[in-house]
Amino acid sequence: MKILISGAGIAGSAVAFWLTRAGHDVTVVDLSPTLRTGGQAVDFKGPTHRMVLDRMGLWEDIYELRTSAVDQHLVDADGRTRATIPHEFTGGDIEILRGDLGTLLFNCSAEAARWIFDDRIEALTPQTDHMGVRFRSGRCDSFDLVIGADGIHSGVRRLAFGPEHEHVQHLGYHYAVVGSGSLDHLRDSTGTDGWDTNGPGRRRGYWYNEPGRLATIGGPKAPDLYVFSGAPEAYERNDSDSQKQYISERYNGMGWRVPEMLARLEDAPDFYIDGINRVRMDRFYRNRVVLVGDSAYGNTLGGFGTGLAVVGAYVLAGELLTPGAGVMRALGNYDSIMRRYAKIARSGNAGPFLAPPSKLGIRLRDLSFSNRVLFKSMMKITDIFATNIQLPEYNSLTHA
Ligand SMILES: Cc1cc2nc3c(=O)[nH]c(=O)nc-3n(C[C@H](O)[C@H](O)[C@H](O)COP(=O)(O)OP(=O)(O)OC[C@H]3O[C@@H](n4cnc5c(N)ncnc54)[C@H](O)[C@@H]3O)c2cc1C
């Protein structure tokens, strides 16, 4: 088949991985001028994620590139620890910088697919057995299938399913990541700790809350991370000055090391902000257009977006490559499998947990980490969401 993937992120590169191996003619288009390597560390947890990564033959590479385990300390304004979040809660079984994962996936099919940057789909026209596509560059072409892997603000979803506001629900919170990969600036400004004080290979991260706001410093998961309540239209999507300004206003007057973070924010080149958003879709496909990754399932910041994207890519490719399935039947099967599995993204919202709206809420949240029974139940729930799928074998993928 001749297939167009919109979005060279995690989901897009993962689908390209499988489809190029099966010999399909794959083009990937991304509006960014180069591969976007920003973002914090993302993680995988449980046997389902492991199985897919094993079948891609990537587990060892990810293991080599993994970040080191970081326990997060919930601190008060004076920096005293009130509770500790063990690294497995935020880092899963294995954690890797989003940029490292994206580059790894891209390299797997860098030669086999055609990658077009700095362009995007402008129009989709359904035809009897293919999809007509017009690109922003003016080029026109037709494809057997168009895959929208272009993230939470998907252009394909808008063109094929309707405007963003009909499908995307802002959940009242934003997150912003500043810096990624480099650890140097994270040293504790007091010079007393920051790393390796918690046993070999164990670094520390710090979380500080005031109602409706979380500020964290610490390690590859979140060099500097802000999670805060706020209206959806609070800043311009493509204007990083207005975004930084908004964060500075929201965090103005906050204690602990927030002034130090805000000073770093001012000239940070590596900066990413988005809302915590739920996506509602009756179906993940229409005609010969299908969505995978955040464009389909949303991103509620619960640590599931990347696992969902990689599993979704596997299921989509597996269904498409099942002999005799036919495209529309394959899309229907993909839809019903992933609809069940992506339930966490439809029901979750990590915002109020990360940045509780009241002082009492913050104390109760902290308790869930210091109380062993509560902590164990939270871990169990996240395990269930990560593994709640009967993953088909897809022998055709093994032979691809
Ligand atoms: C720069 C960046 C940083 C991120 N940082 C974090 C983070 O710190 N924490 C976190 O939990 N999640 C982060 N995410 C989201 C995370 O990558 C996803 O939740 C998850 O990995 C699923 O990936 P995805 O491929 O569906 O979407 P994404 O990883 O968002 O990839 C979407 C891709 O589509 C491209 N794109 C967007 N619109 C169009 C369009 N109209 N046409 C063509 N291409 C388009 C984008 O440039 C991007 O390359 C980040 C995403 C990006 C793009």
Image (spheres, helix red, strand yellow):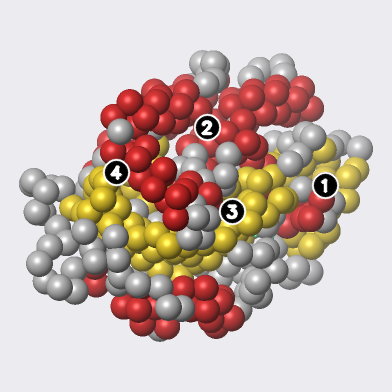
Q: Is residue 398 left or right of residue 246?
A: left
> Mark 1 = which residue?
161
Q: Is residue 126 left or right of residue 189?
A: right
> Mark 2 = which residue?
311
Q: Residue at x 30, y 33 (%)?
A: 371
CA gap between label 1 and label 3 equals 21 Å
CA gap between label 4 and label 1 equals 40 Å
CA gap between label 3 and label 4 equals 22 Å
- Is residue 140 visible to us here? no
Judge depth for marks 4 and 1 and give the one in front.
Answer: 4
Count of numbered circles on the image: 4
Q: Between 108 and 91, which is closer to the camera in this rendering? A: 91
Q: Which residue reaches farthest front?
A: 360
Q: Residue at x 18, y 68 (%)?
A: 188
Judge depth for marks 3 and 2 and give the one in front.
Answer: 3
As helix, strand or loop, the secondary structure at mark 1 comes to: helix
* Residue 21 x, y percent position in the rendering: 51, 35
Neighbourhood count class around disc 3 (C-alpha, 10 Å): few under 14, some 14–19, many 20 upward: many
Q: Mark 3 or mark 1, which is nearer the start of the sequence?
A: 1
Which amino acid does the dot numbered 2 rest on?
Val
* Residue 301 x, y percent position in the rendering: 51, 48
> Mark 4 = which residue?
85
The reply to whether the residue tagged 2 has its Cβ within 8 angstroms of ligand 1 is no
CA gap between label 2 and label 4 equals 27 Å
Q: Residue at x 22, y 54 (%)?
A: 81
